[in-house]
Amino acid sequence: MGQYDNEIRRRRTFAIISHPDAGKTTLTEKFLLYGGAINTAGSVKGRKTQKHAVSDWMEIEKQRGISVTSSVLQFNYNGYCINLLDTPGHQDFSEDTYRTLMAADSAVMVIDGAKGVEPQTIKLFKVCVLRHIPIFTFVNKMDREINDPFSLLDEIENVLGIHTCPVTWPIGAGKTFQGVYDRQTKNITKFYAKDAGQHELATSVVPLSDLEDAEKIIGQVPAEKLREDMELLDGASEEFDQEKVTRGLQTPVFFGSALTNFGVGNFLDHFLSMTYPPMARESDEGTVTPFDDRFSAFVFKIQANMNKAHRDRIAFIRVVSGKFTAGMEVFHVQGGRNLRLTQPQQMMAEERKIIDEAYAGDIIGIFDPGIFHIGDTLVDVGEKFRFGSIPTFAPDHFARVKQTDTMKRKQFTKGIEQIALEGAVQIFKELDAGMEEIIVGAVGVLQFDVLKFRMDSEYHVEIGIDMLPYEYIRWVENPEEVDVRTIQGTSDMKRIEDLHGEPLLLFVNPWSVRMVEERNPKLKLSEFGNMEEFR
Ligand code: G4P
């Protein structure tokens, strides 16, 4: 027994993923409402700002002095301490969105019932699969007409390649929505639209020892439909399997309506019972469990402040084991130095709050005087193990970037390299070329505007950006076996290298990727970079 076991055991750390507009913000808000972290719906800022144009977004960043991009919210519910990681959507979708998933132990996927699985969900989902973390599905907007629930399950299975197991099942939808049937507790939770929204909805939970009783509660026709659906489900869908859920092979599916606050409490209760305390992590000295009394953490995100007046940077760390206390001295393994962590911060409904302590599973922001890199490990003084590095995710957008004033070569290189180190963009160059003209890759297009803005305001270099048509990047896994200069390519393929001289290929479409793989059977391509286990 470690001395912090009780605190750690009650912790759950998860991320919410969704395509924009599926209802992630609304659901987050309802979670906070349940946890008592906010008093009324509508107080989570950021929903409106997400929909602002780029220029407004910059203004918002400046005024608030803190980024509106991903944040971490902590709240208590039923004795649990929940860390909820928000993954930004819309234009501010960036590599940070992916990295956030590296700090989560499970993910909740919100799907708009009328739209099904959408592109952004697929991308984020892939990262969860890579990590083998549990994925829970919340089919939202049941108060509106939705696609047939069976087709939705098929879609999730076919598009995402994961088995589904509905835990709740909807009775009607839109105008005829009557509630959900819980297949585990065998209760019907009735939906009453009239006092929906603000607070926990008064629902009546009716135990059903036999589905025959359903008629009395929801009427004859819907009851018959429910009975049929259950027969179909019992025969066709996989049974709930905790082991498969834990390994990310089966997703428990729930139906609800975040806006009307329906199905949210039920979801939270099931979710908490189907997930475990913080995960252990691999280090170069073996597995580190959260219950290890030694403090350890890793940096998964660095956020530079856009406000010129406060040029601080915040490094977000995930505590892997032990306890963190404000002002404690830790060893920064990659920097090879001891340092004191003062002013640790936690985000609460988008506001910074200074905290005194944190435990395994928690996420905190620490002041970064420019010494941290993504993936760095912090440990108790006297220890020196390090965690595996965080992969580089494939950018989807590429542009050629050059300085307009050629006299400012040094600042240009320094600025670009610094911003790339923070992980906002990735930089590449033509094979065997210098740094005067570079190719920048970003996960979200907004990053190019951020780059231009920051190069100008922080490094006083004006840059020109020419967008390139490439959308697919592949790392060459075996450059010692295959020389990319001589492989048989396609007309739309471009050969580039990163700053370490590692070769990469850019493509306009996925067919060319396949064609190049077919033409060069020895060539091994990868969608993720830097996957080696330890740095
Ligand atoms: P996001 O964070 O995933 O982008 O989605 P967000 O929560 O902002 O929700 C997108 C829109 O969908 C919002 O409407 C929100 O009110 C609505 N919505 C969320 N959950 C439900 C639901 O269960 N049922 C219904 N009918 N609508 C839902 P909006 O008009 O774009 O914004 P607002 O004016 O309501 O703020």
Image: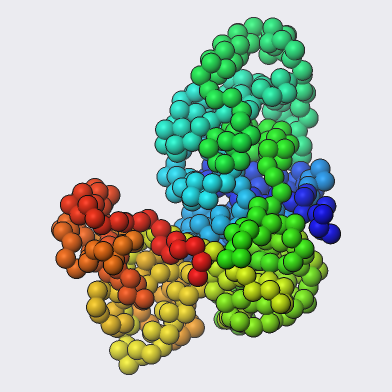
Q: Position of residue 88 (x, y in %)?
A: 54, 56
Q: Is 207 placed left or right of 89 in the picture?
A: right
Up the image or down, 321 lies above or below 147; here it is: below
**Residue at the spot x=49%, y=46% of the render?**
129
Numbered label tally:
0
Query: Hey, which residue is sitting farthest bottom in the picture?
Result: 407
**Residue at the spot x=50%, y=57% of the render?**
98
User: Which quarter of the picture shows residue 353?
Assistant: bottom right
Q: The N terminus appears in which quarter of the rendering?
A: bottom right
Up the image or down, 43 lies above or below 262; here it is: below
Q: Foreground residue, 243 or 495?
A: 243
**Residue at the spot x=20%, y=54% of the render?**
520
Q: Is 521 placed left or right of 408 in the picture?
A: left
**Residue at the spot x=27%, y=61% of the render?**
506
Can see residue 14?
yes
Q: Position of residue 458 (x, y in %)?
A: 49, 83
Up the image or down, 274 lies above or below 403; here it is: above
Q: Position of residue 418 (x, y in %)?
A: 47, 79
Can see residue 363?
no
Q: Foreground residue, 365 or 40?
A: 365
Q: Foreground residue, 14 or 534?
A: 534
Q: Position of residue 305 (x, y in %)?
A: 58, 74
User: Which quarter of the picture shows residue 176?
Assistant: top right
Visual colour scheme: rainbow
Q: Is 86 placed left or right of 340 in the picture?
A: left
User: Which quarter of the picture shows residue 227?
Assistant: top right
